[in-house]
Image (cartoon, rainbow, N blue to C red):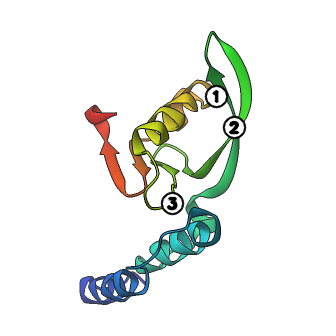
Amino acid sequence: MPLSWNEIKSRALTFSRTWADAANEDSQGKPFWIDFFEIFGITDKRVATFEHAVRKLLGDKAKVDGFVDLFWPGMLLVEQKSRGKNLDAALTQALSYFSGIAERDLPQIIIESPRILRGSNL
């Protein structure tokens, strides 16, 4: 049964309070996103994968293995960074994954925590 709008708002408020002081990608990244999906009553396993392996373009067409922090095919790519890290570098890293993702699976939204880019802003 779908959640009511009031239930989603209540869960979102609890989530924001719980994660207000989050700052570390390594220890808090995955639990953060698991809790985020629970706001909407879905599990991360239903829609996304953590550390999704891709071949990414690096420099002059050299390809290396990379791992997307969180990937929801066709919808969302997350590059999680600890508080204070350079988000421009995170965007460059996120975009480098595109060469290793099938066209049909390219994300509509990139989140480089805490910045969100959508559609024509990519």
Q: How much space separates mark 1 and mark 3, taking CA atoms?
A: 25 Å
Local SS, label 1: helix
Q: Amino acid at mark 2?
A: Gly
Q: How many marks?
A: 3
Task: Provide the residue designation for mark 3.
Answer: 82
Q: Which numbered marker is on residue 31?
A: none
**Label 3 CA crowd tier, 10 Å (few <14, some 14–19, many 20+):** some
* Residue 26 in picture, x, y percent from top left: 64, 64
* Residue 45 rendering spot, x and y as whole percentages: 64, 66
Q: Amino acid at mark 3?
A: Ser
User: Do tag 1 and tag 2 residues touch (Cβ < 8 Å)?
Assistant: yes
* Position above or below: 10 against 81: below
Q: Is residue 94 above or below residue 103?
A: below
Considering every residue shown, the one lying at the far top of the view is: 60
43 with respect to 88 (left or right): right
Residue positioned 69% across, 37% down in the render: 66
Residue at x-position 51% and y-position 60%: 82
Dividing the picture into quadrants, the one containing residue 97 is: top right
| Mark 2 or mark 3: whose residue is earlier in sequence | 2
Q: Residue 43 sits in which quadrant?
A: bottom right
Q: Secondary structure at mark 3?
A: loop
The amino acid pointed to by label 1 is Gly
Measuring from the top left, give residue 52's x and y in whole percent.
68, 48
The residue that mark 1 highlights is 100
Q: Which residue is mark 2?
A: 66
The alpha-carbon separation of the residues under discs 1 and 2 comes to 9 Å
Toward the viewer: 20 or 47?
20
Residue depicted at 62% across the width and 9% down the height: 60
> Quarter of the image containing the C terminus?
top left
Foreground: disc 1 or disc 3: 3
The residues tagged by marks 2 and 3 sit, at their Cα atoms, a distance apart of 18 Å
Check the image and report above or below for 52 versus 32. Answer: above
